[in-house]
Image: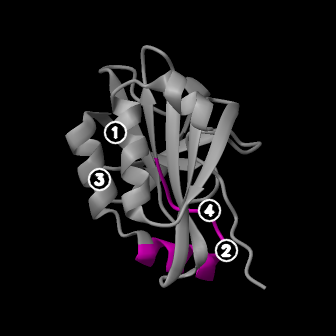
């Protein structure tokens, strides 16, 4: 029996709080404790972060400010199948990309879940930190309309769907 552990970077933290991954001047990766409000950069209208399969449940990598095109490119280029395979081997977090609309504090997280690289889908979370709804879709193409609605700030429509 396969169990996929799910922690959404934009939704939940561990008892140790959030930590972001930072790269030191000598190229080493280390973590730095951050508050719930620091999970996303506060500048810009939209900001995003990622959680990779090799991260612990409370680790994220802030990617900074984004717009629709940048976020779509990140989603399209994310190695979903490879990340899912690694997550299932490690028994760690579900790889996730999260985005926040800074003025409203609405967030959307997209996580890959499944048994392997041929049997997978996505869980999409929407809402405000601590109060998120969930929709499950079967492929990348089904995620894209939700991304478009989020960046079009159709929050009332999204709330109705979640």
Asked whether the beta carbons under mark 3 and mark 1 sit within 8 Å of each other, the answer is no
Callout 3 environment at 10 Å: few (<14), some (14 to 19), or many (20+)? Answer: some
Callout 2 environment at 10 Å: few (<14), some (14 to 19), or many (20+)? Answer: some
* Figure check: 73 above or below 128: below
Q: Which mark is residue 74?
A: 3
| Residue 72 falls within the magenta-colored stretch | no
Please provide the residue range marked out in magenta: 81-97
Q: In this figure, what is the number of numbered marks?
A: 4
Q: Secondary structure at mark 3?
A: helix
What residue is drawn where x is 46% and y is 72%?
A: 83
Q: Secondary structure at mark 4?
A: loop
The quarter holding residue 40 reads: top left
N-terminal of the pair, mark 3 or mark 2, is 3
Q: Which mark is residue 148?
A: 1
Q: How is the image coloured?
A: one colour
Quadrant where the N terminus sits is bottom right
């Amino acid at each position: 029996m396969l169990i996929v552990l799910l922690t959404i970077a934009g939704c939940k933290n561990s008892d140790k709080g959030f930590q972001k991954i930072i790269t030191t001047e000598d190229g080493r990766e280390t973590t730095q404790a951050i508050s719930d409000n620091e999970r996303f950069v506060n500048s810009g209208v939209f900001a995003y972060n990622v959680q990779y399969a090799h991260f612990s449940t409370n680790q994220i990598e802030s990617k900074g400010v984004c717009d629709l095109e940048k976020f779509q490119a990140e989603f399209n280029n994310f190695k979903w199948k490879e990340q899912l395979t690694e997550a299932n081997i490690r028994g760690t977090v579900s790889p996730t990309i999260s985005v926040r609309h800074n003025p409203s504090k609405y967030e959307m997280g997209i996580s890959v879940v499944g048994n392997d690289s041929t049997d997978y889908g996505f869980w999409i979370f929407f809402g405000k930190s601590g109060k998120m709804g969930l929709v499950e879709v079967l492929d990348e193409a089904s995620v894209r309309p939700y991304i478009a609605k989020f960046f079009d700030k159709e929050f009332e429509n999204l709330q109705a769907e979640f």
